[in-house]
Image: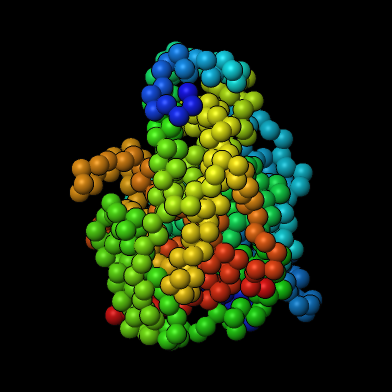
């Protein structure tokens, strides 16, 4: 059986049935790295000999006849701000080039290994996870364009078939942005539900760790493991509805206003066509606006600046020349903002969180739908200009639709929704109620099928 | 600086000194612009319906209440 384009679900079945060996699966991932990563540069450190030995050991274990853990032998990439035993956690920072290797796995890596996952290696991130470019990683669909960030390496690694899933982190959109730009699924779970131990912080009151994968099923399986619920993966087929499921009785909010402002027309059109598909399947489409989205974005953006400055305060004083310009600017601005500002942000955050809850409650929404991004993958130095005459750099544009949900902490999936005329991926975001991550996964899975089966 | 929307280079020097930061001269102007933007953003936030009074600031706890989940 060819492992070239397998999902995690397919690989688990093939491995269980004996149609695929762990060695064959790992060999395919490594062959894809050889073939594609010279151009894409998603990976930092891959150790083929060790990985093949691990795969061979997994095949030997299969012969013992013992039940395999729920993600047994699944090759996973890990963003290089997350500790993995035996690897440095450099975070793409010059000041960390010589840090010792990690002696403990981050808690999420530990949980994935407990469920049988094999760690392929570390993936490229933006410096300190603070940005959307992820140099030197390139977009797999067009090497002139960025993969998005800061989990750009993880998204590109999944998109190129060099691993079956990967870990990312999301403080202002860093899972969802690269997922949308690289055509994979990204899931930002509810804030605070997956442990951050062993992960280099960017903005601790916003940081969230989550999965990137090819399908909602796969991302949900990885999230369950990361959340310490790996035993539930074996029941995932029952929990997620089968293809063709009806949307009757489901209320999906299509958010307008802020989430239709300054967006590439074919991206907005694709979101509308997804909404139409859901309506065709019986969903009640509720058109609504969240008027506080603009404030939520402001809150997330400035909270992140202040907290990032706190994280990097010593480096800014002692060796600012080792920081890239984007990180240094961010840290300097954050360091100069007064405590009064931070306290106001904290108070205002409470307000927007409640207003988002009200939006879902008043319209009785099961989930909300928006474009994941305002544009398909841009070039790093593009300036995006809009119909109203305004312009934005890529960082400002790509975080516009994602940051509000970091302020509220709600769970969000980004799902591939087809390709643009220029052959670049387009994604839609499916936003859920706080702490209703599994409920959201069920809805996102059904939407993914509706997209795939739309005429 | 406070609620002023205009931030001068001297303002930046004073704040930087206060927080123990050395800001090179060639970076001061960009920081003036950034802090003026921040002041404008904070003023806009005051328009937030139901914005909490000053005494409520700091009340936000980013973690969620137990028992609300779908487990």
> How many numbered marks are there?
0
Residue A250: x, y in percent?
45, 80
- As rendered, which of A263 and B6 lies closer to the eye? B6
Residue found at x 34% / y 80%: A279
Left or right, B36 with reference to A27: left
| Visible residue check, residue B67 | yes
- As rendered, which of A360 and A6 lies closer to the eye? A360
Establish if A414 lies above or below B21. Answer: below
Left or right, A91 with reference to B7: right
- As rendered, which of A71 and B37 lies closer to the eye? B37
Residue B29: x, y in percent?
39, 19
Residue A402: x, y in percent?
44, 53
Residue found at x 77% / y 44%: A103
Residue A128: x, y in percent?
56, 38
Left or right, A194 with reference to B48: right
Left or right, A35 with reference to A22: left
Question: How is colour applied across the structure in the image?
Answer: rainbow
Residue found at x 64% / y 51%: B61
């Amino acid at each position: 059986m060819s492992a070239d384009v397998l999902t995690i679900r397919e690989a688990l079945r093939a491995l269980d049935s004996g149609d695929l060996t762990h060695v064959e699966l790992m060999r395919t991932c490594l062959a894809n790295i050889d073939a594609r990563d010279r151009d894409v540069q998603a990976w930092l450190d891959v150790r083929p000999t060790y990985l093949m030995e691990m795969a061979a050991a997994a095949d030997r274990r299969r012969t013992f006849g013992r039940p395999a853990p729920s993600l047994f032998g699944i090759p996973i990439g890990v963003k290089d701000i997350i500790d993995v035993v035996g690897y440095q956690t450099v975070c793409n920072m010059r000041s960390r080039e010589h840090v010792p290797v990690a002696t403990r796995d981050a808690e999420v890596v530990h949980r994935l290994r407990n469920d049988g996952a094999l760690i392929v290696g570390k993936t490229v991130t933006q410096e300190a996870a603070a940005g959307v470019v992820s140099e030197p990683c390139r977009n797999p669909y067009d090497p002139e364009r960025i993969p998005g960030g800061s989990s750009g390496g993880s998204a590109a690694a999944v998109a190129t078939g060099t691993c079956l899933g990967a870990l990312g982190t999301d403080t202002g959109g860093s899972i969802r942005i690269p997922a949308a730009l690289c055509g994979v699924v990204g899931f930002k779970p509810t804030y605070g539900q997956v442990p951050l131990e062993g992960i280099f912080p960017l903005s601790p009151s916003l940081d969230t760790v989550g999965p990137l994968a090819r399908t909602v099923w796969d991302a949900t399986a990885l999230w369950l493991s990361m959340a310490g619920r790996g035993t539930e993966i074996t029941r995932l087929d029952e929990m997620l509805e089968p293809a063709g499921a009806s949307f009757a009785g489901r209320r999906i909010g299509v958010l307008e206003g802020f989430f239709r402002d300054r967006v590439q027309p074919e991206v907005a059109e694709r979101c509308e066509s997804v909404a139409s598909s859901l309506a065709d399947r019986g969903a009640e489409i509720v058109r609504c606006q969240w008027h506080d989205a603009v404030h939520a974005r402001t809150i997330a953006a400035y909270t992140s600046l202040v907290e990032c400055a706190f994280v990097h305060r010593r480096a800014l004083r002692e060796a600012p020349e080792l920081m890239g310009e984007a990180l240094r600017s961010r840290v300097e601005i954050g360091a100069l903002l007064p405590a009064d500002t931070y306290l106001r942000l904290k108070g205002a955050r409470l307000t927007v969180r409640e207003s988002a809850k009200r939006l879902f409650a008043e319209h009785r929404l099961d989930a909300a739908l928006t474009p994941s991004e305002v544009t398909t993958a841009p070039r790093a130095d593009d300036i995006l200009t809009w119909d109203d005459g305004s312009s934005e750099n890529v960082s400002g544009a790509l975080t516009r639709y994602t940051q509000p949900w970091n302020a509220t902490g709600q769970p969000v999936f980004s799902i591939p929704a087809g390709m643009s005329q220029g052959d670049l991926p387009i994604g839609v975001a499916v936003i859920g109620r706080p702490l209703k991550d599994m409920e959201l996964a069920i809805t996102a899975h059904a939407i993914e099928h509706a997209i795939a089966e739309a005429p | 600086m406070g609620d002023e929307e205009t931030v001068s280079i001297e303002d930046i020097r004073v704040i930087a000194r206060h927080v123990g930061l050395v800001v090179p001269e060639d970076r001061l102007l960009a920081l003036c612009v950034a802090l003026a933007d921040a002041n404008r953003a904070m003023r806009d936030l005051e328009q937030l319906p139901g914005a909490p009074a000053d005494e409520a600031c700091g009340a936000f706890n980013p973690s969620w209440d137990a028992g609300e989940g779908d487990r």
